[in-house]
Amino acid sequence: MHRIRNFCIIAHIDHGKSTLADRLLEKTNTINEREFQNQVLDSMDLERERGITIKSHAIQMEHMHKGEKYYLNLIDTPGHVDFSYEVSRSIASCEGALLVIDATQGIQAQTISNLYMAIDHDLEIIPVLNKMDMANAMPEEVKDQIVDLVGCKREDIIEASGRTGMGVDTILEKIVDVIPPPAGDPEAPLQALIFDSMFNSFRGIIAYFKIVNGTIRKGDKVMFFSTGHEYLADEIGVLKMKQDPREEMGAGDVGYIISGIKDSSEVKVGDTITHVKNPCSKAIAGFEDVKPMVFAGIYPVDADEYEDLRISIEKLQLNDASLSFIPESSAALGFGFRCGFLGLLHMEIIQERLDREFNMDVITTVPNVSYKVYSTKGEVIDVHNPSGLPAVNYIDRIEEPYIVAQVITQADYVGAIMNLCIDKRGTLKNQVYLTRDRVELTFEMPLSEIVFDFYDKLKSISKGYASFDYYYTDYQKADLVRLDILLNGEMVDALSTLIYRGHAYDFGRKICEKLKELIPRQQFDIAIQAAIGAKIISRETVKAVRKDVTAKCYGGDITRKRKLLEKQKKGKKRMRQIGNVEVPQQAFLAVLKLD
């Protein structure tokens, strides 16, 4: 056990984690040249296309140090703020962390929040300064920032480059010397923490675990703590590039277990595996429960695919435990699910994965956050969906969730970023100069304001330099109204939103203009209206496609033309009463990208 090291790599998005992981795998000969491809741990096509890590991947490396063979378990983590739950799970199953910081960009917001998470779990931190081969690297300034943040000595910071492989040997030595071996008792009752799972259509559900105490052998009868179900350990093993079966695994090991589980609800991430005969007394306290921040409805385009969609989302949930969902129905879209996501990028990724991995065509409604509505009777109602809002005369007050946002940026962009945050109803709480030209701004603002386009706008006004991280605080009273969109007087519930009263008029006008472009012309006029309660605040009309009925009149009295036009007008009016309007999928998405 003293030769095992469990560590993860934490960093801000695009600071070179995956490339550094590639070099570590090459150096320890875990992967041969034929199997090698860039960002080898990013196995999803989506991860490669976007250049981001979405899933934590675990892999075991073997490294010779001073004549002894050490087993290094690396758990790669994502860097985007939306996947902080994945990071919390990786940190819970490690004893040490490589803190990777880009020498050209310095410390960014996600680096700080992941570092605090690692320190809370008492992880040993090894600071690594990556991208040292770049011409615009500024090692001395960034080292000052690291010393301020971590409180380490300057000479402890390893200079490295994921691209050229510089400093990788030093990193491996540091991992062996600095990170402590796992503390556990191989003789105690079995306690293993499930930190991930995936679905294999031939072998059922494969759970990834880390053994905290005890020993497990192939063929043992095991039990999952939270469900109490019993299984046979058909196959256990460690994770190399492929699964590598073993007969026995002890405390400190990280590996996988296959026991032919078919039902996805039986495997919960964060659950504890123990023996049936000699169970442990309590479950392992691991990572925190995930709190979805953004809610949106996902509906099948074809109503018959509802069951398929449910199975697809369940399988996806195995691979991504931070996705939560409950069934709901809508007048316009039929049956579907109200899903909770960690952020907008998470929502986009889930939509893409449903399309690619399961061939599901889905419609996604406007995302929103959950509100607390206090009724005049003194009841508290949780509202995830604008259609669930009680009538106005029953509402005493509405409260919405607030967050504290930390933005780290260069000093030149402070003014523009302050304007953006104040437009989004933010209040400035604090402003700290980290170095001469880097500022940390702390704002308190409503979560609903950052759901839409805050991140994109922040990146564009700061030319990509600002980084952003947030954590949830509490609910505060808000002046919100429900904005409904009517087509021909019929309400489209999928386009309803709860919005701040001051922004409602502007938003209503923009939505009507946008829908006018997107809704195809029909045989009759379509009135597009935005309304708050019974009050119409904006209107656009999609003109009817008309046949020229007066073409056959050449000359003659004007009344002949008028008679034909009146006849056409009557027909159009009758048609409008029975005609219904199809809303294209682009219309639902366009609402997100109004600006």
Image: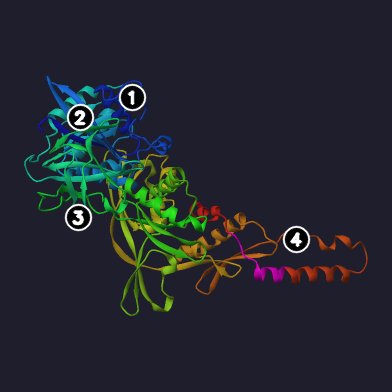
> Which residue is disc 3 drawn over?
228
Q: Residues within 10 Å of mark 2 (few under 14, many from 20)?
A: some
Amino acid under disc 1: Arg
Amino acid under disc 4: Arg
- Reading the chain from its start, which is encountered first: label 2 or label 4? 2
Residue 509 lies, in percent from the top left, at 55, 62
Q: Which residues are magenta?
A: 572-582
Asked if the stretch drawn in magenta spans residue 538, the answer is: no
Q: Nearer the viewer, residue 67 or 131?
A: 67
The answer to whether residue 569 is left or right of residue 190 is right
> Which residue is disc 1 drawn over?
163
Q: Secondary structure at mark 2?
A: loop
Q: Could you give the CA–CA distance between mark 2 and mark 1, rounded to whole angstroms?
A: 18 Å
Q: Name which residue lies at 36% across and 42% down.
A: 201
Q: Nearer the viewer, residue 233 or 444?
A: 233
Image quarter hosting the N terminus: top left
Q: Secondary structure at mark 3?
A: loop
Relative to 299, does residue 40 appear above or below in the rendering? above
Q: Name which residue lies at 37% across and 27% down.
A: 38
Amino acid under disc 3: Gly
Q: Residues within 10 Å of mark 3 (few under 14, many from 20)?
A: few
- Per the rendering, the mark at residue 85 is none
Q: Could you give the CA–CA distance between mark 2 and mark 4, rounded to whole angstroms?
A: 74 Å
Residue 345 lies, in percent from the top left, at 40, 47
> Which residue is disc 4 drawn over?
546
* Residue sticking out furthest to the right: 556
Amino acid under disc 2: Ile
- Reading the chain from its start, which is encountered first: label 4 or label 1? 1
Q: Could you give the CA–CA distance between mark 4 and mark 1, rounded to whole angstroms?
A: 63 Å
Q: Name which residue lies at 41% across and 43% down.
A: 459
